[in-house]
Image (cartoon, grey):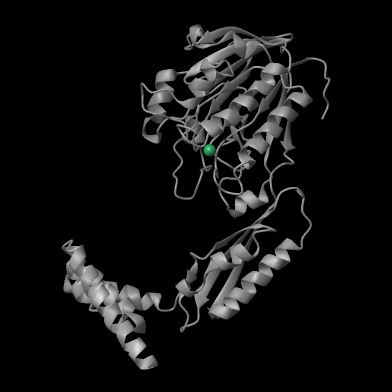
Amino acid sequence: MQVTSVGDWLKLAVISDPHLGTKWGTPREEDSFDQFQEAIERSLDIGAQIILIPGDIFDTRIPKLEVWEKALRIFSIPLMRGRSDVSLAKTIDKPTEEISPLAFSGVPVVALHGNHERRTKGLKNPVEALEAAGELVHIHGATLIFDTPDGKVAIHGLSNVPDQHLLASIQAWNPKPVAGAFNIMVIHQSVGNFVFSTEERPSLALEDLPKGFDIYICGHVHFRADATVDGKKLILPGSTERTQLLLVEAQNPKGFYMFEIGKVMRQEFVELKTPRDFVYEEMRFENVDIPELYGATKSKVEELLSRPLKNNVKKPIIKVRLVGTLAKTASKSEFDEYSIIDEFKDRAIVNIGKDALVSPGLEDKLQLLREFKEKRLSIDEQAMALLEEYLKDAEHVRPFNIRGLYELLVEERDEEALKQILSVVQSLTDTEIGGDK
Ligand SMILES: [Mn+2]
């Protein structure tokens, strides 16, 4: 990328959805921090004059102190890189007393809060806490106008709003492009066809976005994408951290955007080097038995591990999704995916999805449920009947009076239930010992 260019007003970095603190307590707990720090440092190395973060800096509303400690260190990096040649000229709908002069002692960071950080009205969210520390400027239904050596740039931002209030919030805010400035509109919502997950409905049609801005930027969606709004670009940078192990995440690299804004706008997606490799594969089966399933899954993981890695420092994430039907004699619960995960734990972070693997007996079980419904059994009776159905082949529970125990437990007569169990266990051990003699 060309670092020195004449006539550009501003080099703007857009780094989205770092989700700091996600996967805490797992082998991946450092990832969100490593990737965000790389994005911040590299954007500064390329010459970013403003860093814009469209929400979900943190993974939770009230992050742990351990997460804060790491986050505060990373946010101090842009402050220490020397004063940027941009200055805040004016704010609209943003009281200037909320902004700390410290935020302009280095390269300023402008941020929205995302849905992961949003809190009830009257409570402070963690992005506001970062603002109080002078590490960034938070915007929500507000505009910041910056003077750069060559022109004005206006950042108009609406932090995350619950879907049902979104249109009303945009109408109430009613942002207008600033004359003579390059106008950036930034939000954190699902928009158009871009949604966080298949369960989510888009909360905003592309045509509902306010008109007349030079570029639209949207956080929230974790894979990189772009579209056109009113003849202008809509950029979804995607998250720096891989929070969902979906196929689309395996196909899209993680990174951030650098924009060179001026009479013309240039953009570059900068791919990060710190993310772990992520491989996603689907395996299809028909009437597979359990030993076969173990064998096939293990050799698939082995095969995926033999491929060259981009990141040789961190163990790759390998997701294998099992799809299809099990043999008649097989039950899904007999397949313990954790034994495979454990077997490979020194070489990879393995994830095995077996939701789409169907036991042939499932159809029979659904039929059973339908019958219960027709017979109008009570919930308790349905549970009892299901329990009996499940246990009918389990020899080791046969000596127990399951129905009797269940009824005692429903009535919270736990002591009596325990006594019954102990007396059965006693009689069983007595006969075992007796048999040995
Ligand atoms: Mn997010």
Does residue 423 appear to the left or right of 191 in the view shown? left
Quarter of the image for the N terminus: give it: top right
Q: Position of residue 79 (x, y in %)?
A: 67, 17
- Residue at the spot 54% in from the left edge and 43% down from the top edge: 24
Q: Position of residue 380 (x, y in %)?
A: 20, 67
- Residue at the spot 26% in from the left edge and 79% down from the top edge: 424
Q: Position of residue 133 (x, y in %)?
A: 55, 17
Residue 139's place in the image compared with 303, above or below, is above
Please identify the quarter of the rendering in which residue 239 is found: top right
Q: Nearer the viewer, residue 353 or 147?
A: 353
Q: Position of residue 170 (x, y in %)?
A: 43, 24
Quarter of the image for the C terminus: give it: bottom left
Does residue 426 appear to the left or right of 271 in the view shown? left
Does residue 188 appear to the left or right of 224 in the view shown? left
Please identify the quarter of the rendering in which residue 213 is found: top right
State whether residue 293 appears in this view.
Answer: yes
Residue 198's place in the image compared with 427, above or below, is above
State whether residue 399 appears in this view.
Answer: no
Q: Nearer the viewer, residue 426 or 110?
A: 426
Count up the numbered dots.
Answer: 0
